[in-house]
Image (tube, rainbow, N blue to C red):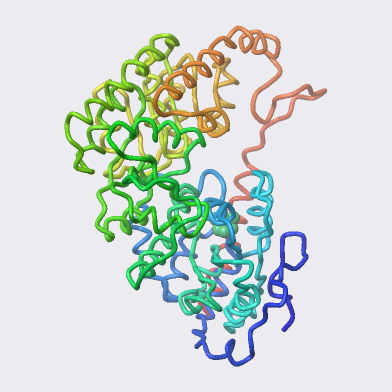
Amino acid sequence: MSGDHIRDEDGGTANAAGASASATSVADVPVRFVDKGAAVAAEGAGCHAGADALRDAAAAAGKSELLDRYATDYPKGPHDQPQSMCPAFGSLRVGLRMRRTATILSGSACCVYGLTFTSHFYGARRTVGYVPFDSETLVTGKLFEDIREAVHELADPERYDTIIITNLCVPTASGVPLDLLPEQINGVRVVGIDVPGFGVPTHAEAKDVLAGAMLAYARREAEQGPVAAPATRRTDVPTVTLLGELFPADPVVLGRLLEPMGLACGPTVPTREWRELYTALDGAAIAAIHPFYTASVREFEAAGRTVIGSAPVGVDGTAAWLDAIGDACGIAASAIGAAKDAALPAIGGVLAAAPIDASLIVSGYEGSELLVARLAIESGARVHYVGTACPRTPWSAPDLEWLETHGVRVKFRASLEDDLAALEEFRPDLAIGTTPLVQAAKARAIPALYFTNLISARPLMGVAGAGSVGQVINAALANRPRFEKMKAFFEGVGDGDTSGIWSDTPVPRPEFAKQFAKKLAKQAAARASTAST
Ligand code: SF4
């Protein structure tokens, strides 16, 4: 068997040495041929065009049940197209961080190029396998055969515990049936997921698609008999599982907060190795620090676990979180009180030592936006607006209630337009948000901080969090005079399309834009009618 079906992003191959499947084992899985119309419609579309067409094609190709589940787990907001990066980046990153795990993508080459480029930009030091396709392999069902061969080639138990294969938009819309892949090959687990941009709104929720699929698999294994303890297990006291990608220091801080209650920190989901999934499922309680892991919560609840929302941020947040965890784990009131006495005065002291005297707006797509706003308010900031790309869930309810009590407008599934409108309306002293919001703020000489790079890359919980957010916000606020100087210096050099130094000032031509829009609409109609014949 050739290794041509697995290509890495450089066009090289990523074959598992010495691992090859016999022709018999490869041929005994039935193939569901995809619908021709759906495949052709899907092949010509991407995330910037034809989401409805892709969704219809996927439904026609047998993925209705999956799309219905995604629609319930990840309800849509004002934007039904990703406004940031491709959502599949979230699940890709989760897989790439796991030890002894191989990752394969199936999708358009341009999508795979973008995803692998971003992965390596963020420091993934692993190869991403790629199964290419064309119209013919989609229509004839050969793509599924290619995927199956690729998985068999990689399934080397010496190297891997798990292979994750991800259908991107086009293979999902074409109904490529990953559920027909074997559950395991030579003891290597096979986890197939569909992560289409037209079904999973944000890359945050794509993390849940994979985490949920792995938890479901691990739960089935645990139900069938004893499973291996993780190599990293350090404690025999009851543990609290953390849900969400946290700053590395946060679990350490959380462990100290839990200690007086006789509890310890368990694994963080998404995990770094397969066996941690069993310990995660075995947690005394589950702390949904990030509130958007709907599929993962379903698995924890099926395993009989109680899931707690919010996080120990600031004095109020920490007190409420310790109460909730203590209740869920049946801890005596005196021990809960001891945990609070050990933590709250110190947190209050640090918050008072780094006060924030400013008005803010906060937005992002990480899922921790509400927590950051709470911390800022406890430091003295006046927060007008919090926008999050994530949906409202039962686990964001405590933070929503607290923020609304403090006069904050909270917008779930916020679009960039919502964030920009808040910037205009409130003209805050500081904006925390995504790249386009930060750019818009800086253009108005308003200091701004990137949520992902500057806020998410800091501790938030306990004493460590109380000090760190105030520090970064105050440093940014001190930059205001520099922004005002720059704005004054560049005053009069134009704006938007006409910005810059020109010998002739560019003239906007809206009539050209209209012409292009008409041509594109015509092209889309022609494509739709070809697909339906
Ligand atoms: S896989 Fe991602 S980049 Fe590709 S079309 Fe879908 S949403 Fe866009």
Q: How many marks?
A: 0
Q: Is 431 positioned to the left or the right of 121 in the image?
A: left
Q: Is 504 positioned to the left or the right of 488 in the image?
A: right
Residue 425 rendering spot, x and y as whole percentages: 41, 21
Ligand 1 lies in which image quarter? bottom right
Q: Is 362 positioned to the left or the right of 237 in the image?
A: right
Residue 362 rendering spot, x and y as whole percentages: 44, 27
User: Residue 220 occupies which quadrant of the picture?
Assistant: bottom left
* Residue reaching furthest to the front: 236
Residue 431 in view (yes/no): yes
- The residue drawn where x is 68% and y is 44% is 121
- Between 499 and 526, the one lying in front of the other is 499
Residue 525 in view (yes/no): no
- Between 260 and 290, the one lying in front of the other is 260
Residue 152 rendering spot, x and y as whole percentages: 61, 78
- Between 264 and 159, the one lying in front of the other is 264
Above or below residue 489? Residue 386 is below
- The residue drawn where x is 47% and y is 76% is 183
* Residue reaching furthest to the left: 333
User: Residue 358 occupies which quadrant of the picture?
Assistant: top left
User: Residue 491 occupies which quadrant of the picture?
Assistant: top right
Above or below residue 499? Residue 79 is below
Q: Quadrant of the N terminus?
A: bottom right
Residue 328 rendering spot, x and y as whole percentages: 22, 43
